[in-house]
Amino acid sequence: MTLHFTNTMGHRLEPFQSIEPGKAGLYTCGPTVYDFAHIGNFRAYMFEDVLRRYLELSGFEVNHVMNLTDVEDKTIMAANKAGVTIFEHADKYIHAFFEDLDTLGIARANVYPKATDHIPEMIEIIKQLEEKGHTYESEGSLYYRITSFDGYGKLSGLTLDHLQSGARVDSDEYEKEDARDFVLWKGWKEGEPKWESPWGPGRPGWHIECSAMSSKFLGPHFDIHCGGEDNIFPHHENEIAQSEAANGCTFVNYWLHCRHLMVDGEKMSKSKGNFYTLRQLLEKGYKPRAIRYLLLSAHYRQPLNLTLEGITAADQTVRRLLDFQTRLKEASMSGPEGDPVPEIKTLVQGLEDGFKKHMDNDLDMPQALAVVFETVRDVNRHGDTTGLNRGDAALVLQALQKIDSVLNVLTQEEAVLDEQIEALIRERLDARKNKNYARADEIRDSLKAQGIILEDHAGGTRWKRE
Ligand code: AMP
Ligand code: ZN
């Protein structure tokens, strides 16, 4: 089987064929930067991280674009409340967002365009829509007439009965079963930021930014567009209406949406107040690797219920993988010399084939992980009975690390450890500067106990693992 995805457009499992061989253009709707992202948002970003990493493992060069929504109803309200400009307010939360991505080991997109940096591009698309007769003005705002676009509803499955053309909606988010003409350009209101436009001063509606920025960075027709399931309607439906009407070509080939992260059967969301931020979970002592594993271990098209017990269980599961990796590393360095034996070669082949087979099948992570843990069990059993030689261990380790280029729980753990070591080394240097030699020695001894050797030299301290 080659790589297949379930396309929300048409709800079918389809083989993935990129527009340009070996390359994949990926657009993922990013955060509205008015507050810390909650862990539900990170379910979406984690699914997209797994998708992107698996595309890369499958040989695609991925161009990943994620927008940052810095002008929208919520950012304006929050900035006004804080008494700062939307730019100052957004900067703080953009910074926090990147920190959270790093903590969770989510790879950075190639570019993070901000809405406020692309107002001219948005005005340009709106002008095209106006020229082609898809818009009308009302009370200083410009609206998209949804019945002017034949394909309206094709992503979400809304039928003509649900289209309320002429009924306008100004707010950026609204509920299903209520498809109305949506706003492209909002006339200026007291207390809101404003930009000049052919329709008077004001600001863009939310949906237009993704049409403008995706075509700027990926072209008018690209491979994959993702988001959480709540993005299907109205946001992605409106993006399609804008982009396809303006550019006259298919917008996106594959639409992928992840189901929500739930709490007690309800979507985790800011408005319901049933959310945790990543920072809150870390303060409670949960490890990033456990949160990462929990979020990625479910199938992206299945709802995932968050419980604190679930995070603890995820941590134990990652621990098993880490212990396995340690055993392999030790055996590959100090085990008996030798080439991999046939039994180990078969297990590794089974691991690689099994992981690929299930991931190719619409990123079926639960099945792919089942293969990983079967292999852990079988290799451990072989190690306990027959022993592992260096060749065996190196072969399994190589396969495990390839799989971890998608999971990113093993290397992620080492990166966090490295950071802790660096922090202790800085503390030791400070202690020595302050002539607190007892503390300095204590740090050296505690690191030595963890197998970390410090070497002092003129410019500072180097460290290595024993
Ligand atoms: P927002 O900042 O609300 O625009 O959301 C950013 C991303 O997070 C979007 O792709 C949403 O679909 C996604 N999202 C929001 N809440 C959840 C949730 N509870 N579970 C999964 N994804 C979510
Ligand atoms: Zn979007």
Image (cartoon, helix red, strand yellow):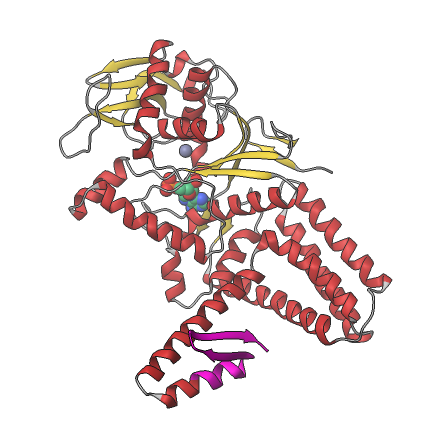
Q: Residue at x 43, y 20 (%)?
A: 241
Residue 449 is inside the magenta segment:
yes
Quadrant, the N terminus:
top right
Q: Residue at x 33, y 30 (%)?
A: 118
**Of residues 321 and 60, the one drawn nearer to the viewer in this rendering:** 60
The residue at the point 32 percent across, 87 percent down is: 435
Location of residue 226 in the rendering, given as x and y in whole percent from the top left corner: 49, 36
x, y (%) of residue 150? 46, 13
For residue 414, above or below residue 233 = below
Judged from this view, the residue extending furthest toward the front is: 458
Count the numbered circles shown: 0
- Residue extending farthest right: 342
Q: Is residue 263 left or right of residue 6?
A: left
Ligand 2 is found in the corner quadrant, namely top left
Q: Residue furthest left?
A: 190
In the depicted structure, whether residue 75 falls above or below residue 11:
below
Quarter of the figure that contains the C terminus: bottom right
- Residue 394 at x, y = what percent? 73, 64
> What residue is at 26 percent from the left and 35 percent from the top?
73
Q: Is residue 296 above or below residue 140?
A: below
Q: 425 or 88, which lies in front?
A: 425
Front residue (pair 104, 332) = 332
Q: Does residue 228 appear anywhere in the picture?
A: no
Q: Is residue 330 left or right of residue 64?
A: right
Location of residue 140 in the rendering, given as x and y in whole percent from the top left corner? 20, 18
- The answer to if 456 sits in the magenta stretch is yes
**Quarter-of-image position of residue 351:** bottom right
Image height of 12 relative to 375, above or below = above
> Is residue 328 visible in this depiction of the protein?
yes
Which stretch is magenta?
443-466
Q: Is residue 436 left or right of residue 215?
A: left
